[in-house]
Amino acid sequence: MNCQVCGASSTNFVSNFRPYLDYDTDVFDCVACRARFAPHDVNAHEKLHSQSSKYLYQADIEKQIVSLLSNGDVVNAKSLLGKKPVNSFIIDRVIALPRAHKLLEIGCSRGYLAAWFLANGRNVLGVDISPTAVAAALKSFGDHFCLPDDPRIRRGAPYDVIYHVGTIGCVVSPVEMTKELIGLLKPGGMLVFNAPNRMSCDFLGGTWLSTPPPDLVNLFHPEFWQKEFSSLAEVEVNVLTAGRLTSGYIRMLAYFGASPVTRLFDVNNYKPPSFWTKIKRYFLTFYFALIDPPVPHEYGIHVVLRKKS
Ligand SMILES: [Zn+2]
């Protein structure tokens, strides 16, 4: 199988991986770009958004952001979004720029991050592949969201900043997508995003990160971005280390191995882990957090590509 990230034919089968009771997939390593990947399912994201799935948490964040922003509470909305380090990274990079700058968010889901920028008077268009997610964003935050084939995306180019959060690990051709996005930027414009770090699972000898396929299908080596894009852009890469509690959680998952405990779909009808299993998981998370050193943050490759003139 050719590499889903760089297209090279030098790939190795790693294993069959069953992250959920109702889902399994094959996993491969690329010798050329050092990515780890699982075959992409083009329908996965719409299925996850439109069915009773583990994506239900996204609707919950949307609801909370709607409530906070309708009261003008951008401070607590930022705190809520900032629970994910990548959101703080994007917000801090973008908010420092002039107010008139044109922003494009790729993979905006239900629109809650773009909505924060809108509430701060920024000019942003959000794009998502899931019609269900886009419909929810339009309903909650107004006419600032569209599907990938909408002519407004090209009409709005060139952009000052394009950003995406938790998206590059979920697409079928990350290199082509990144080149296309650089093409939509002004010279000197920034593409800002995070990428999942395969070193996090390598560190503990695991197969995958805590977000498994079919949602997340590409894990990157931190050196990949410099090697692949330095001819098109000035490349800045920061690799995060996870906090102690997150590190404990990652170590706990590695301790239990790949044995699934939850369903991907129909999540309201699955039998949850027993009380004692939950206690054991909590105990081990805190134990590892206290005893062992932190691990690389799973989604902590923070990348800024500044388009060359
Ligand atoms: Zn590759």
Image: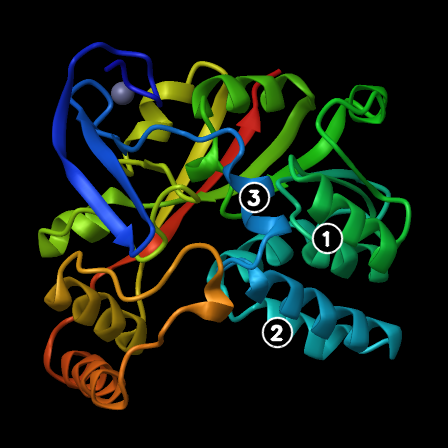
Query: Label 1 belongs to which residue?
Result: 111
Q: Position of residue 187 (x, y in %)?
A: 67, 21
Determine whether the residue tagged by mark 1 lies in a helix, strand or loop.
Answer: loop
Visible residue check, residue 294: no
Q: Are marks 3 and 2 in contact (CB under 8 Å)?
A: no
Q: Which mark is in front, 3 or 2?
A: 3
Q: CA distance from mark 1 to mark 3?
A: 18 Å
Q: Is mark 2 within 8 Å of ligand 1?
A: no
Q: Between disc 2 and disc 1, whose residue precedes?
A: 2
Q: Which quadrant does ligand 1 occupy? A: top left
Q: Is mark 1 within 8 Å of ligand 1?
A: no
The part of the image, by quadrant, that contains residue 75 is: bottom right
Q: Which mark is in front, 1 or 3?
A: 3
Query: Label 2 sits on what residue type?
Result: Leu
**Position of residue 26 in the picture relative to residue 167 (left or right):** left
Q: Position of residue 165 (x, y in %)?
A: 54, 47
**Position of residue 28 in the picture relative to residue 168 (left or right):** left
Q: Between disc 1 and disc 3, whose residue precedes?
A: 3
Q: Residues within 10 Å of mark 2 (few under 14, many from 20)?
A: some
Q: Is residue 185 above or below residue 296?
A: above
Query: Label 2 belongs to which residue?
Result: 80
Quadrant location of the N terminus in the rendered image: top left
Query: Label 3 belongs to which residue?
Result: 47
Q: How many labels were placed on the picture?
A: 3
